[in-house]
Amino acid sequence: MPMLRRTGVLALTAILVAAGGASAAQAHSSRASSANKSIAEPMVAKRGWNKAQFRCLERLWTRESDWNHRAANGSSGAYGIPQALPGHKMATSGRDWRTNPRTQIKWGLSYIKQRYGTPCGAWAQFQSHRWY
């Protein structure tokens, strides 16, 4: 019988730790998202894009990756904040593309400029096709 109690306590502890871990992970993700947006905002302004363009970018990358620089789509191979496909394309902006949000943002903004002109152009594409 003591073994059953110990197992029950261990199981309950595991459940509580898992629940707390999820909250901690969500808090970390939220902080990373906020930090990554803070990196992007001056980079967007430096390109001459206004606040409305940043809002479009914010919506786009929130839908794509929730601004998580380690976001990986297992089925497609897309990676990072801009969900580059394949992810290694971001190496053109830096060898640290897997871990550096600034490198990913730099690559993503260049991609958007080249392909759609502006973040709102990319957002419009995403809204109509569910990809950009």
Image (cartoon, rainbow, N blue to C red):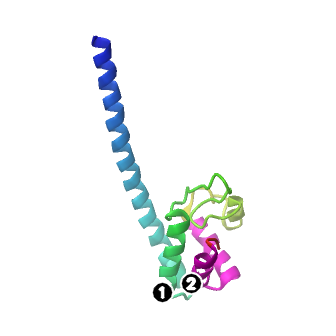
| Residue 13 placement (x, y as % from top left) | 32, 31
State the quadrant of the N terminus: top left
Judge from the rendering whether residue 18 lies leftward or rightward of residue 64; answer left or right: left
Where disc 1 sits, the SS reads helix
Q: Is residue 46 magenta?
A: no
Which residue is denoted by mark 1 in the rendering?
Answer: 52
Q: Give the mark, 2 or 1, whose residue is nearer the N terminus.
A: 1
Around disc 1, counting alpha carbons within 10 Å, would you say few (fewer than 14), some (14 to 19), or many (20 or more)?
few
Q: Residue at x 53, y 70 (%)?
A: 61
Where 26 sits versus 107, above or below? above
Where 127 sits versus 90, above or below? below
| Magenta stretch, residue numbers | 102-129
State the quadrant of the C terminus: bottom right
How many numbered circles are shown? 2
In the picture as drawn, the residue positioned furthest to the top comes out as 1
Q: Quadrant of residue 93?
A: bottom right
Q: Amino acid at mark 2?
A: Cys
Judge from the rendering whether residue 130 lies leftward or rightward of residue 66; answer left or right: right
Question: Is 77 or 28 nearer to us in this picture?
Answer: 77
Q: Quadrant of residue 10?
A: top left
Where 41 sits versus 18, above or below? below
Q: Between marks 2 and 1, how big is the CA–CA gap? A: 8 Å
| Residue 125 placement (x, y as % from top left) | 63, 79
Badges 2 and 1: C-beta atoms under 8 Å apart? yes
Which residue is denoted by mark 2 in the rendering?
Answer: 120
Q: Quadrant of residue 114?
A: bottom right
The secondary structure making up most of the magenta span is helix
Q: Residue at x 48, y 66 (%)?
A: 36
Q: Amino acid at mark 1?
A: Ala
Q: Residue at x 53, y 80 (%)?
A: 44
| Residue 92 placement (x, y as % from top left) | 71, 66
Question: Is 32 or 103 nearer to us in this picture?
Answer: 32
